[in-house]
Image: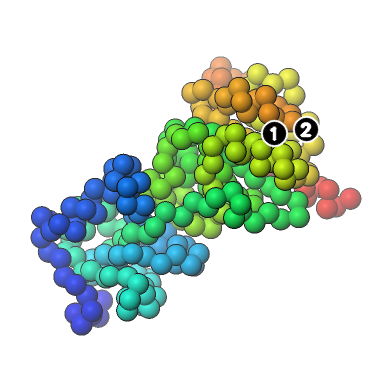
Amino acid sequence: MRSRERWLLQISSLQNQRIKQLVNLSKRRERDRRRLTVVEGVREISHALAAGLVPSEVYICPEYCDEEGEQLITKLETFAADQTTIFAVTPAVFAKIAYRGESGGLLMTIPYIALPLAQLTLSANPFLVIVEGVEKPGNLGAILRTADAVGVDGVIICAGGTDLHNPNVIRASLGALFTVPIAEADTGEMIQWLHDQGIQIVAADPMATSYHMDAVLSGPVAVVLGSEAAGLTPQWLQAADISVKIPMFGVVDSLNLSVATAVMLYEVVRQRLNRTKL
């Protein structure tokens, strides 16, 4: 990597106060207090920048940067004047702040990104996925990847569970956190908003009597799924226009939440594609 000493601030000490503050963002309480999270890796940072996000701080380990990372640094330089502070760190410092391996030698902090419901842009035929109480960052990240693949209008997180801005969610999503509109809302607010928008609420419930492929899902639809441990709360089940289940014939009584979400969302896609052929 070519020399950028003219603008890079150098950090080599593991005891540097800024590094300690950065490491503290591994704790949800600290992330929530500062409204900041960490993004690392060339792919993830590329998606974040493409979505128009402006990093607060950037940390570069020159020893780990390849040609792709070098090109990305050139983009990051455009923020350096007055919006972003860029630091060069040693491999030892980067190992302390990174969540995984070398990550291409790039890491940055960004403000929280979740939108209020009123700012979600809906298509003419809305398609939403709502997840209540998702427990594992890996599941939420995988759901975001599927949501990106099927082209939903938005993903909405309800009733707590895992932290949307957990760096492990960003990692598991492969950057889809920045390609899919995302909102957070409490359940009551969400249900009322869906009713106001005229969007059918389809609840995934293993106790339902109808299968997901027998429901009509080609119109405005919000697919709602709960945690693997508890499923959906009674509030969602009572508010649903229809409850459906995925056929399962094995001994284990539950699909992984991200897999179940993919099955449900691709049934919506299948029906919509079939409708366009008529």
Q: Report the side of 109 relative to 11 (left or right).
A: right
Give the total of numbered labels: 2
Q: Quadrant of residue 181?
A: bottom right
Residue in the image at 19% along x and 80% along y: 5
Residue in the image at 19% along x and 65% along y: 89
The kind of secondary structure element at disc 2 is loop
Count neighbours of disc 1 (C-alpha within 10 A) and say few if under 14, some if 14 to 19, many if 20 or more: many
Looking at the image, is mark 1 or mark 2 earlier in the sequence? 1
Amino acid identity at mark 2: Ala
Coloration of the structure image: rainbow
Q: Whole-percent x and y of residue 177?
A: 48, 53
Q: Whole-percent x and y of residue 263?
A: 64, 37
Q: Quadrant of residue 135?
A: top left
Query: The N terminus is located in which quarter?
Result: bottom left
C-alpha gap between disc 1 and disc 2: 9 Å
Q: Whole-percent x and y of residue 102?
A: 27, 57
Residue in the image at 75% along x and 51% along y: 125
* 31 vs 178, nearest the viewer: 31
Q: Report the side of 137 relative to 244 (left or right).
A: left
Residue that label 1 marks: 202
Q: Quadrant of residue 200?
A: top right
Residue that label 2 marks: 215
> Which is closer to the viewer, label 1 or label 2?
1
Q: Whole-percent x and y of residue 257?
A: 53, 33
The kind of secondary structure element at disc 1 is strand
Q: Report the side of 32 relative to 19 (left or right).
A: right
The image shows residue 215, relative to residue 38, as above or below, that is: above
The image shows residue 97, relative to residue 27, as above or below, that is: below
The image shows residue 231, relative to residue 101, as above or below, that is: above
Amino acid identity at mark 1: Val
Residue in the image at 47% along x and 49% along y: 173
Answer whether labels 1 and 2 touch (C-beta < 8 Å).
yes
